[in-house]
Image (spheres, coloured by chain):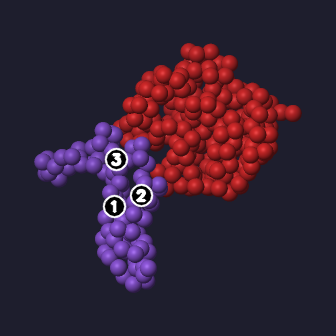
């Protein structure tokens, strides 16, 4: 059976259908998960897509963290289930404490919408497994608060533990150490500002995002998350 | 124990060392007002609300939980909590 990916939708999320379509076209199956749901049983991987969850009120991700589904997402992550946060989803994961650091306003206070070159810095994550380090991908970014920051101790840990998954080639937003994506210590939770689902068809100008999403579908296929969560929950 | 309604103010601002482009942009606009001598502008947010509490210390403690757990992101922000008005009977 095709790996089943849940795409979590908050009020204000706006990239969920793009993510579902991209996953389906790579041979996965995908469905929407409503933010009020309290279970993610049956999914082999989760995507928290981009948008403006809860209007980005207070701070991006600050309110989404309290959505009922986030407890289920945390359990799924703790059971080694693959979780990927894209753009606003990355912000939600940092606010929820599933990833370190924070995303502050872009340097220069500019909203940036551009296709960037990002370099794969680690092949050891659910989003980059099997993708050689140094692979350069053309993927769009589209954000105001994408300037990744963390304290110096966290940054040292991210570097030492090979947890910087993606770096920009040419820093668009002031992110510390050119960071475009990071993973947790267990390497099953990844957050990134670029939108791989928007680079998944030649009509979109690039298919490089499929390289990452294909790796996620493959990770979902080997994930034992669903049975583990079923017994935990 | 009797409780009363306490008005509190929570102010949130970016930590020292975190770039504050909004504050910097405001500061750069001030010379146009003929106020070139203003410096150190930091932008932030202010929240007012009321809590049911037994006394000032209790109100401060409750508002601090709200500030630390929700209103501020400790990675990039700091908050300060002030009890503004004490004790309207509920």
User: Are marks 3 and 2 in one subunit?
Assistant: yes
Q: Quadrant of residue B62?
A: bottom left
- Looking at the image, residue A94 sits to the left or right of residue A203; the answer is left
User: Are marks 3 and 1 in one subunit?
Assistant: yes
Disc 3/disc 2 C-alpha distance (Å): 13 Å
Residue nearest the observer in this picture, A108 or B85 = B85
Mark 2–mark 1 CB contact (< 8 Å): yes
Residue B81 marker:
1
The structure residue drawn at horizontal position 39% and vertical position 69%, both measured from the top left corner, is B58
The structure residue drawn at horizontal position 54% and vertical position 35%, both measured from the top left corner, is A193
Instruction: Tell me the subunit letter for badge 1.
Output: B
Q: Which residue is mark 3?
A: B14
The structure residue drawn at horizontal position 57% and vertical position 51%, both measured from the top left corner, is A65
- The chain painted red is A
Tell me the element at label 3: strand
Foreground disc of the pair 3, 2? 2
Determine if residue A21 is in view.
no
Q: Which residue is mark 2?
A: B67
Determine if residue A92 is in view.
yes
- Looking at the image, residue B89 sits to the left or right of residue A33; the answer is left
């Amino acid at each position: 059976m095709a790996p089943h990916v849940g795409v979590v939708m908050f009020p204000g999320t706006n990239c969920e259908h793009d993510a579902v379509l991209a996953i389906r076209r790579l041979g996965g199956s995908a469905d929407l998960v409503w933010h009020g749901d309290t279970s993610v049983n049956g999914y082999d991987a989760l995507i928290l897509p981009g948008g403006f969850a809860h209007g980005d009120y207070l701070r991006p991700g600050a309110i989404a963290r309290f959505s009922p589904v986030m407890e289920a997402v945390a359990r799924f992550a703790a059971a080694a289930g693959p979780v990927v946060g894209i753009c606003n989803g990355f912000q939600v994961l940092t606010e929820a404490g599933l990833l370190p650091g924070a995303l502050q306003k872009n340097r220069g206070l500019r909203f940036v919408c551009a296709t960037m070159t990002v370099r794969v810095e680690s092949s050891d994550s659910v989003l980059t497994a099997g993708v050689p380090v140094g692979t350069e991908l053309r993927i769009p970014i589209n954000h105001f608060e994408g300037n990744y920051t963390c304290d110096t101790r966290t940054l040292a840990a991210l570097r030492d533990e090979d947890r910087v998954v993606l770096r920009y080639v040419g820093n668009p937003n002031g992110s510390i150490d050119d960071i475009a994506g990071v993973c947790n210590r267990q390497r099953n939770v990844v957050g990134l500002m670029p939108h791989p689902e928007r680079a998944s068809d030649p009509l979109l100008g690039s298919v490089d995002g499929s390289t990452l999403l294909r790796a996620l579908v493959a990770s979902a296929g080997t994930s034992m998350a669903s049975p583990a969560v079923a017994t935990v929950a | 124990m009797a409780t009363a309604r306490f008005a509190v103010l929570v102010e949130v601002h970016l930590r020292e060392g975190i770039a504050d482009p909004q504050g910097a942009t405001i500061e750069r606009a001030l010379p146009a007002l003929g106020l070139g001598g203003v410096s150190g502008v930091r932008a932030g947010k202010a929240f007012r609300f009321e809590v049911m509490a037994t006394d000032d210390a209790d109100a401060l403690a409750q508002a601090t939980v709200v500030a630390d757990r929700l209103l501020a992101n400790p990675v990039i922000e700091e908050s300060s909590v002030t009890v503004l008005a004490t004790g309207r009977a509920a």
